[in-house]
Amino acid sequence: MNILVLVKQTFDTEEKIVIQNGQISEENVEFILNPYDEYAVEEAVKIKEDSGAGITVLTVGPNRSESVLRTALAMGADKGVIVELEEQADEYAIAKIIKAAIKGQEYDLVLGGNMAVDSGSGQVSIRVAEELGIPQVATITKLSLEGSKAIVERDIEGDVEVIEVNLPFLATAQQGLNEPRYPSLPGIMKAKKKPLERFTLEDLELSEDDLATRTTVQDQYLPPKKQAGKVLEGEIGQQVHDLVNLLRSEAKVV
Amino acid sequence: MSKKVLVFVESKDGKLRNVSFEALTVAKQLAGGGEVIAALFGTGATEFVQEVSQYGSNKVYVLEDEVLVTYTTDGYTQALCQVIEDVQAEVILMGHTAIGKDVAPRVAARFGAGLASDCIGADLENGDIVFTRPIYAGKAFQKKVFNQGKVFATLRPNNFELKENPVQAEVVSFQPVIKDLRTIVKEIVRKTTGGVDLSEAKVIISGGRGVKSKDGFQPLQELAEVLGGAVGASRGACDADFCDYALQIGQTGKVVTPDLYIACGISGAIQHLAGMSNSKVIVAINKDPEAPIFQVADYGIVGDLFEVVPLLTEEFKKVLVLS
Amino acid sequence: MLLLLNFLAFLAVTGYAVYLFVQLVYSRYLFVKLGKKVDFEPNLKERINAVLVNVFGQRKLFKDKKSGLMHLVLFYGFFIIQVGLVEIIIKGFIRGYEFPFGGAYKYFSLLQEWTVFLMLCAMVYAFYRRYIEKLKRLQLKRDAKAAFVIIALITLTIAILLTLGFEKVMLGQNPDFSHAPFSGVITAAFSGIGKAAGTALFYLFWWLHLLTVLSFMVFVPQSKQAHELFAMFNIFFKKVGPVGKLRKIDFEDDGVEEFGVGKIENFTRQQLIDLYACAECGRCTNMCPASVTGKTLSPMHLIVKMRDHLTETGASITSRSPWMPSFVSGTSALAPSLTAGLAAQETASTVEMPNLIGDVITEEELWACTTCRNCEDQCPVANEHVDKIIDLRRYLVMTEGSMPNEATRYFQNIERQSNPWGINRKERIKWREERDDINVPTVNEVKEFEYLFWVGSMGSFDKRSQKIVQSFAKIMNTAGISFAILGNEERNSGDTARRMGNEFLFQQLCHDNIANFQAYGVRKIVTIDPHAYNTFKHEYPEFGLEAEVYHHTELIWKWIQEGRIKPVKEVNEAIAYHDSCYLGRYNNIYDIPRQILKSVPGVKILEMERNKENAMCCGAGGGRMWIEETQGKRINVERVEQALDLSPTMIGSNCPYCLTMLTDGTKAKEAEDQVRTRDIAEIVESSLAG
């Protein structure tokens, strides 16, 4: 069984966002493996432990992204692929790049996070499913493989949908799928010796149209600072009375 | 510079979703005098035509197909692609809902087009459509424009003002050709309690560890009923097993943007704030005056939620009856 | 002729018993030798002192005065009656033999008689404690071996008196009540039965006495009585240096693929002696915060289970039978853990040995430990439970990558943002902005400073703990102390990571911190966190830190004595004072915090029943602060209940972790409105003028 896991390096979720010249500053920023992708890697490693599998992890991004491949390899993936891409690209182009990078490889299962915590767009994995012509199951919380088919549970706005699908397919991981492991020291050491394949865009068969982004980010900005709130005072009954008045007259939300 | 705009209108539990009306309103604005076409899927869709035409769609495509009663990626992708082809739509809008998140990237990819997902703003600037969307869990925003091809966008519920614009809509009955469904929906297990959907609720009453037990949610439920809102929870309350994870609001749960968010017994961990800090008005009720929730709240009451919440329910009952 | 036969029979029986004994002890010696060899640091003075205090002084035993006295009698009695034992044996071959002590013999006889009698009394008391009083800690492990000890020793003492009593009957002598007061009673009672009957009974009891001694000797290595042999060595060979200091792992060694201890043989030899030294007295478990609140961890069982596992594993590896004679091992009553051992022995090659972690000790047990060292402090034979638990955790975390989910998150947060919550590290300095009446410069904002104030992750990020560091900063301002903080350059101390078994992460943090200290020329460090204090003071030096390290209470007391600060305002509180483990048992600081509180006008100190070295842990140590406590009662609630029993108006502490746990405890008891929780720094600040 061959599994492909699509991963992305993102800011640590606690990082403050600083914008300089319309760009998000990367100075002194801690980078991590996108948490949803971490679920995907963990799920692949669990499948490998249960029934054996070869796991390839792939990322598209700047050179620094290599660290997340090492993390995934330390968790138990077997091989890393990085497509070096320093400039910005949209989800359309990235899906095309991924398709080109795995050309000629057959995967029984493709896993990814349901979204990246930085862009929050949740598109790339699904676009890859379309590019590969395989079905998708998004926001999964449980995956059971039974021979050539799988029973998958997915989160749909709090409810659970149980789906049957044949391999190969693509699934995106939602929180609750598993608890990602902490890589062991021997795992980290072994990861250093695992194969890591590097591509630049020139190495891949990509047409001009493939790289022609469909969307462009025009501007990025921080939300306006919130006004300081009011902590009400007085006897509790009075506070409640005041609050209802404020919500009706000042905030006008009720 | 008028455009043909298609809106995928979604229904849930026999009702049209509010975000679809938001999408229709946005569509009218972006069309610049062009046609706004609504697409309704599933048997019984015809009965919604009247409602849809209240928001200015000139044409309503009705796809009364058995296959479309239950959502499947393949079924909806094929149907939507065929409608888009048929109407020659240039802009395609839908809600950033479970369905929207699933089908929009797939359809956009099939057309080789771009997609702006989870938008909270859509404006025409010099004839170009500019979408605004949050990035980094709402810590920043970006404006996105399209370079070429069709324009796809999903809209975050509760972020667009509704504008009614009743028109006489033309109904087009459309028969899609759907084949080879590769996923089979075996079962849908309902975890959310009926009533108002969290992601679309205008008012959310949310409980944290401070509610102390399953029963502790009762007063919150009562307040929610009075205000026509929904009940949510922090991760702490879910972890402590006071409620189901389906109610979880936060970075790892649902991201909500109601008009009024009342946090009861929630300390305000950053994970929680990421899921609700874009609410219009935030009220915090907490015993601990040091709780970080007060830093994001517009109004705060330092006190025991079991004392404050029932009083609040009574007070709202009084004034809402009067008005 | 009969005497010759008797002598031959004696030789045969004794020879066999001695053979068995030597075999048994040698086996255990070999089992211990399976452990890793570590460099022996001589420190003879410290070692001999430990032996004098805890072996001959029996100091730890007197933590339970009644049992201590009982044991003291048995311990010294054991030596004294060895001499009498030799004499009695000779009496079996030479009629009426007496040691040639001349006129002093009478006193020798008197000493023997009283010793035997007191030992008998001690054993009867032991019986009473175990089976009638049913002392809780003695009920932790109920087996026939414990009963055998009592029966054998009571039999032995009575047999000695009977042998001596009937000897006089055999010899036709009168009882000598003044020098044989106890055996004399027997002589007197049976003087009428005649010499022949007296002779028969003398030999009967002589043999009973001999066989009891020999069977007890063979029994000793195979039971908890092995402590008689191993305890002294254990105390002598134990790790020297600061208590609770953990062993450094050398990560430079490339060949190593296994970290921590996953197999019993991977403990050090010194650690393995511990196992046989255990007397199963239960004092550790009796005080363990995890055990008393219903967790699966019991330090005594941890040691006992590992001991039996070592015996089984050792038997399998060395192909030596650990149980002799073999018929004994058949009786499961005497050897409860034997079945597995035998099975392993017989089919060592086919049957897999149980795994140390998982089968013998569960992960749940290992994660339940708060590293409070109450068990170690109690242990009369100087066993170290905590470093073993951490060695096992090290294996789980670093070699296996297996740990509770909260631990994973904890480590990731420390790695990424250097604090347990994963809050942005650039917010570390923000606490100083919350009060405008304090002046807290960073090392970059001042040219010189005397003390580096290590704020710690709790003090920096936790809302409640920020109040403590703000109070302490205010105190330093008032005292006119020159100090600075590292600000956003401060990282986590790594103590918790180390105690959770992540030695790798600890060493990274340790090296970074030391480099930082050196870069800013730090000579003195003060912190409000006893955990950071302990690791800086006792563990960082091994990695190159050269600085004086202070806990804030030490300096507050110094400054009060120097008159730099004067607590003058009345603080009318009845304070139940809680000793933190890392200031208390790890660093032996009990009086200073109390002196400070006494110097604050109006304060009344309430002492909890479990205080100072017996103080119960708040439940936060060893990483427990970050792991959900789901099993049994919450430790912090138990501790707060102990405090509330004194009806305090305040609970005082010296540690931000303790304070958090105690505050949560008062909330759980819904007592937070009546009983406030404060750090000593806050109490002192509230007493300063102006």
Image (cartoon, coloured by chain):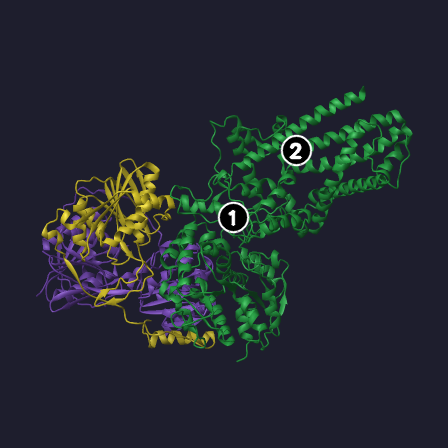
Q: Is residue A209 above or below residue C211?
A: below
Residue C337 appears in the picture as rendered? no
**What residue type is disc 1 on?**
Asp
Judging depth in this view, the residue of B143 and B61 nearest the camera is B143
Colour of chain B in the rendered structure image: purple
Going 29% across and 51% down the picture, which residue do you hit? A68
Chain coloured yellow in this rendering: A
Q: Position of residue C377 (x, y in %)?
A: 60, 52
Taking the view exactly as shown, the residue that stands out farthest to the top is C1
Q: Position of residue A24 (x, y in %)?
A: 24, 64
Taking the view exactly as shown, the residue that stands out farthest to the bottom is C690
Going 80% across and 20% down the picture, which residue do you hit? C2
Gap in angstroms between the C-alphas marked 2 and 1: 30 Å
Judging depth in this view, the residue of B147 and C55 nearest the camera is C55
Q: Secondary structure at mark 2?
A: helix
Q: Which residue is mark 2?
A: C219
Judging depth in this view, the residue of B99 and B141 nearest the camera is B141
Colour of chain C in the rendered structure image: green
Q: Is residue C331 above or below residue C401?
A: above
Q: Residues within 10 Å of mark 2 (few under 14, many from 20)?
A: many
Q: Left or right: A233 with respect to B89?
A: right
| Pointers 2 and 1 in contact (C-beta within 8 Å) | no
Q: Quadrant of the N terminus of chain C?
A: top right
Q: Position of residue A32 (x, y in %)?
A: 31, 55
Q: Which residue is mark 1?
A: C387
Going 33% across and 43% down the picture, which residue do you hit? A190
Please state the chain letter of the residue tagged with numbered disc 1 in the rendered image. C
**What residue type is disc 2 on?**
Phe
Q: Position of residue C678 (x, y in %)?
A: 54, 67
